[in-house]
Image (tube, rainbow, N blue to C red):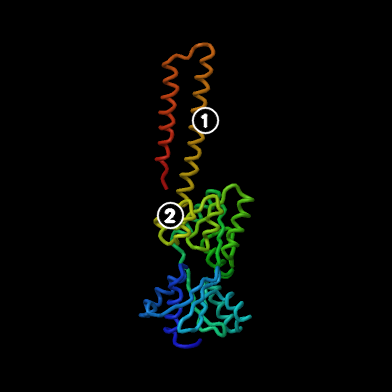
Amino acid sequence: YGGNENELMTITAAIEKGSQHPLASAIMRKAEENGSDFNDVMVEDFQSITGKGVKAKVNNEMYYVGSPALFEELHGSIESDRKQKITEMQIQGKTVMVLGTKKEILSLIAVADEIRETSKEVIGKLNNIGIETVMLTGDNQRTATAIGKQIGVSDIRADLLPEDKLNFIKELREKHQSVGMVGDGVNDAPALAASTVGVAMGGAGTDTALETADIALMSDDLSRLPYTIKLSRKALAIIKQNITFSLAIKLVALLLVMPGWLTLWIAIFADMGATLLVTLNSLRLLKIKE
């Protein structure tokens, strides 16, 4: 809207260089493709506006890069033609980022989240094994609904700030016994910490998310998730079997003491036999394949 498109993209990329958000990476990649020298741009007073965007000074002018909601707060409202353009892009499943100052909007950048090939299959598998899937996103409702429907998520929650994600996980924990959270960003860290099991995306994840989570998927492959759950459930079942079996053998040995039937060999068999059988039972976990 104001100024040269490449120039505006360079300013946006220079500001976003200070952010760890996945959308920032997308903008920087696009700027690099356009041959932009955004690394040479002097950026001062960079500040993150939690869940809404970032702001920084370039050439002594304060710029804001963030969601349309951020600019509605800054300007009071967004012009109807621009608002319509934003809505159109959101319905298509695109995330709209806005570059502007306190006075005006300079450009709109639409970023489309590519759905991983495995996502739909993974969500289907999770739903099949009785797990309720919920999508928590800071993105707007229209984009979230478009993407959530494509992958088959049972519940979609959008326009969430980090504290909203945290509160939702707390609510879920009150209703359900176990809640697992998968995330990769700084905004996900509080919710990852509050969940029963936090799973971070290892390669794409920020340091904060990795530090907070209990499990890291190092290959960034969500298809390992249903397998991990299946393996964990089986491991838990085998642990319970082993404890029950060990206690039962000890109880039988104890009962044999009363009439004086417990010989040394029976005692050794009860002890070593239990150890061997418990080990063999545990080896059944090796049979679990994806």
Sequence-wise, the earlier of marks 1 and 2 is 2
SS under mark 2: strand
The image shows residue 275, relative to residue 180, as above or below, that is above
Identify the image quadrant of residue 287: top left
Question: Of all residues shown, which one is farthest toward the top?
Answer: 260
Asked if 103 appears above or below 115 in the picture, the reply is below
Q: Relative to the observer, which residue lies in front, 150 or 52?
A: 52
Q: Position of residue 214 (x, y in %)?
A: 48, 51
Q: Which one is in front, 190 or 221?
A: 190
In the rendered image, the residue lying farthest to the left is: 35
**Rendered residue at 55%/66% (across/down):** 138
Compare residues 274 and 119 and report the one nearer the observer. 274
CA separation, marks 1 and 2?
A: 33 Å
Residue corresponding to mark 2: 217
Image x and y of residue 105, in percent: 54, 83
Mark 1 secondary-structure assignment: helix
Q: Amino acid at mark 1?
A: Thr
Q: Is residue 206 shown left or right of residue 91?
A: left
Picture disc at residue 244: 1
Give the residue displayed 55% in from the left and 68% down from the top: 50
Q: Nearer the viewer, residue 279 or 125?
A: 279
